[in-house]
Amino acid sequence: MQKKNRIILALDVTSRAEAMRVVEAVKDHVDAIKINWPLVLATDPNIIRELSRVKDVICDFKIADIPNINKLIVEQAMSRGASAVICHGFTGDDSVKACVDASKGQVFVVTEMSHPGGKQFTAPLADKLAALAKSAGARGIVAPATRPERIAALRKIIGALEIISPGVGAQGGKASDAIMAGADYIIVGRAIYDAPDPGNAAKALADEVKEAV
Ligand code: O7M
């Protein structure tokens, strides 16, 4: 994905028509599309291929299983046109490595999650999860825009790996704060697709990000 607008659209809508409406409106203002189970279950797995014709697609299946199942999930996503996948790290280094191998390194590992409950179990483990992402050969990590100071701290652990950061808008985080703290990309869902004009909302965020770089 080309680092231009530094925005990844979280396309958490539940119909193909709605997905295409939003993508058409925002495609010039985002660098990639992240899809999660709601859209895939509401449509079918070929939505990955369809969207990949417009933008790079990151499959956020938060993969968290034994190595063999992780490998099978990643192979299915990549063979349908995904550019990258997202996995959990608490399953251990062999499970993360299986995702890294099956995607040829195109994996982002979740560290501290952005929602309030993310403080409960993921925050205490986040530094270790970030170190695991690095040692396993992942492309990057997912770190919370709701706690920019944690983005900065995790950056020190992972060095040049990429940070993609959710929690902007609906969860209270601010795009410019996340970028200034060291995120490479922000991940934004509801603040774009629920906006009266998704194109304008995405453009306003892209402008905010440009100011912060
Ligand atoms: O902008 P929102 O709040 O509507 O959506 C946020 C998106 O980011 C949604 O797709 C979540 O699955 C995702 N996300 C989080 O909100 N918090 C996290 O800690 C991690 C993710 C994520 O993208 O993980 C890969």
Image (cartoon, rainbow, N blue to C red):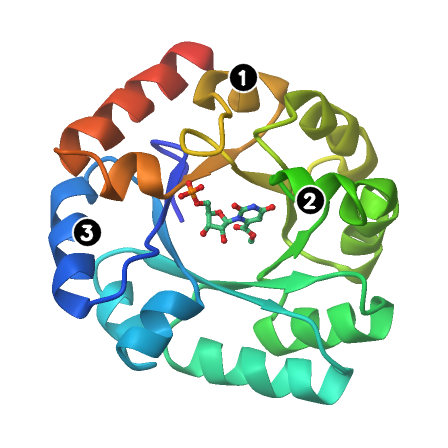
From the viewer's perspective, is 60 left or right of 211?
Answer: right
- Per the model, the C-alpha gap separating discs 1 and 3 is 25 Å
Residue 32 x/y as whole percent: 36, 49
Quadrant of the rendered image containing residue 17: bottom left
Front of the two marks 1 and 2: 2
Instruction: Return the residue at label 1.
Output: 177
Amino acid type at mark 2: Gly
Q: Which badge, 3 or 2, comes first in the chain's sequence?
A: 3
Amino acid type at mark 1: Asp
Q: Which badge, 1 or 3, comes first in the chain's sequence?
A: 3
From the viewer's perspective, is 70 left or right of 119?
Answer: left
Query: SS class of the residue under badge 3?
Result: helix
- Per the model, the C-alpha gap separating discs 3 and 2 is 30 Å
x 34%, y 31%: residue = 5
Query: How crowded is the residue under tag 1: few (<14 C-alpha within 10 Å), some, or many (20+)?
Result: many
x 79%, y 50%: residue = 134
Does label 1 point to a residue whose CB lies under 8 Å from ligand 1? no
x 73%, y 31%: residue = 155
* Number of disc labels: 3
> Mark on residue 117?
2
Instruction: Return the residue at label 3.
Output: 23
Residue 88 x/y as whole percent: 70, 62
Query: SS class of the residue under badge 2?
Result: helix
Amino acid type at mark 3: Val
Query: How crowded is the residue under tag 2: few (<14 C-alpha within 10 Å), some, or many (20+)?
Result: few
Quadrant of the rendered image containing residue 192: top left
From the viewer's perspective, is 152 left or right of 146?
Answer: right
Q: Kindly check if marks 1 and 3 are in contact, taking CB atoms under 8 A apart as contact.
A: no
Residue 11 x/y as whole percent: 32, 54
Query: How crowded is the residue under tag 3: few (<14 C-alpha within 10 Å), some, or many (20+)?
Result: many
- Per the model, the C-alpha gap separating discs 1 and 2 is 21 Å
Q: Kindly check if marks 3 and 2 are in contact, taking CB atoms under 8 A apart as contact.
A: no
